[in-house]
């Protein structure tokens, strides 16, 4: 199958409201069948058919945990594509913005979001590590202090570039809870999230997409984002 044919097949697969709703729900959080039923209002047989199609075409994956299968988006590129579709029609979210821990810090697929993610982007822009974001989904270029700032965080940007995927390097991802603000998406956003997790600066809440900033993280990142967390 040619690249054009593959793109056309993907477009046809996404041309269904229930499948798009499923994918949008899975971007926000990995989910079981019962959770996806509640998110889509589809019948169980209909939902099962849509999940089968999405798995066969590699858009989602499923992992058995006990008696249940937990589904998640297969790749960051799929998450970004679905988000871009909703942005194109002027709908950045479904339902009310999150509150509590999810609003403070969470993952947006594989990058950091919420008030913490927004603060990171704004601080990186203020220190001239990256350029100021323009509008949603616009590219974020590296600034003159990129090497110094990202080096101080322990992030090798050359390694991020050699990721091996076709993902965008860095872009302004619209933040679901911090309306009108952005966090860092793309390879740079993923590298930031990965570094924060591996350094123990944030810890996952495994029942949701929330992450908690640790005391070590507060101290280690104080030079960049201050003491507002």
Image (cartoon, rainbow, N blue to C red):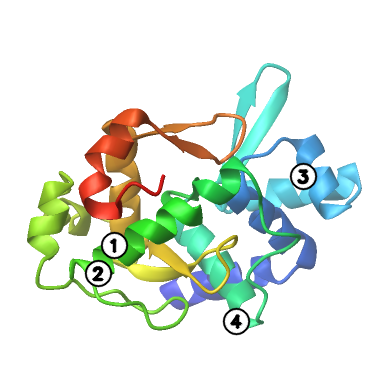
Q: How far apart are labels 4 and 2 at the CA level?
A: 29 Å
Pointer 1: what residue? 123
First in sequence: mark 3 vs mark 4: 3
Q: How far apart in space, not on screen, are marks 1 and 2 (Cα)?
A: 5 Å
Confirm whether residue 165 shows in the render: no
Between circles 3 and 2, the one closer to the viewer is: 2
Q: Where in the figure is residue 178, as x and y percent of width and height?
A: 55, 63
At a point 29% along the width and 51% down the height, the residue shown is 226
Question: Separation of disc 1 and disc 3 at Cα?
Answer: 36 Å
The crowding category of the residue bearing disc 1, from other C-alpha atoms within 10 Å (few below 14, some 14 to 19, many at least 20), is some
Checking the image for residue 126, the label placed there is 2
- Above or below, comparing residue 225 to residue 121 in the picture: above
Query: Dot 4 corresponds to which residue?
Result: 88
Where disc 1 sits, the SS reads: helix
Asked if the residues shown at circle 1 and circle 2 are in contact, with their CB atoms under 8 angstroms apart, the answer is: yes
Q: Quadrant of the C terminus?
A: top left
Residue that protrudes farthest toward the front in the picture? 227
Residue 209 position within the rendered picture, expressed as x and y whole percent measured from the top left = 56, 41
Q: Is residue 125 visible?
A: yes
Secondary structure beneath dot 4 equals helix
């Amino acid at each position: 199958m040619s690249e054009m044919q593959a793109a056309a097949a993907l477009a046809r697969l996404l041309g269904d409201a229930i499948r798009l709703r499923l994918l949008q729900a899975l971007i926000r959080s990995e989910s079981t069948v019962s959770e996806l039923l509640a998110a889509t209002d589809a019948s169980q047989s209909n939902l099962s058919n849509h999940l089968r199609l999405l798995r066969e075409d590699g858009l989602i994956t499923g992992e058995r945990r006990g008696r249940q299968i937990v589904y998640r988006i297969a790749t960051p590129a799929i998450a970004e594509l679905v988000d871009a579709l909703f942005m194109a029609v002027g709908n950045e979210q479904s339902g009310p913005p999150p509150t509590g821990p999810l609003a403070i810090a969470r993952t947006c697929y594989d990058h950091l979001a919420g008030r913490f993610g927004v603060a990171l982007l704004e601080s990186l822009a203020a220190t001239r590590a990256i350029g100021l974001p323009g509008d949603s989904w616009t590219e974020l270029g590296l600034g003159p202090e990129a090497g110094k700032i990202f080096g101080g965080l322990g992030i090798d940007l050359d390694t991020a570039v050699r990721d091996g995927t076709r993902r965008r390097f860095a872009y302004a991802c619209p933040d679901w809870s911090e309306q009108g603000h952005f966090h860092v998406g793309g390879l740079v956003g993923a590298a930031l999230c990965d570094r924060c997790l591996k350094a123990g600066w944030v810890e996952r809440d495994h029942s949701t997409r929330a992450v908690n900033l640790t005391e070590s993280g507060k101290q280690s990142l104080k030079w960049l984002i201050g003491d507002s967390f």
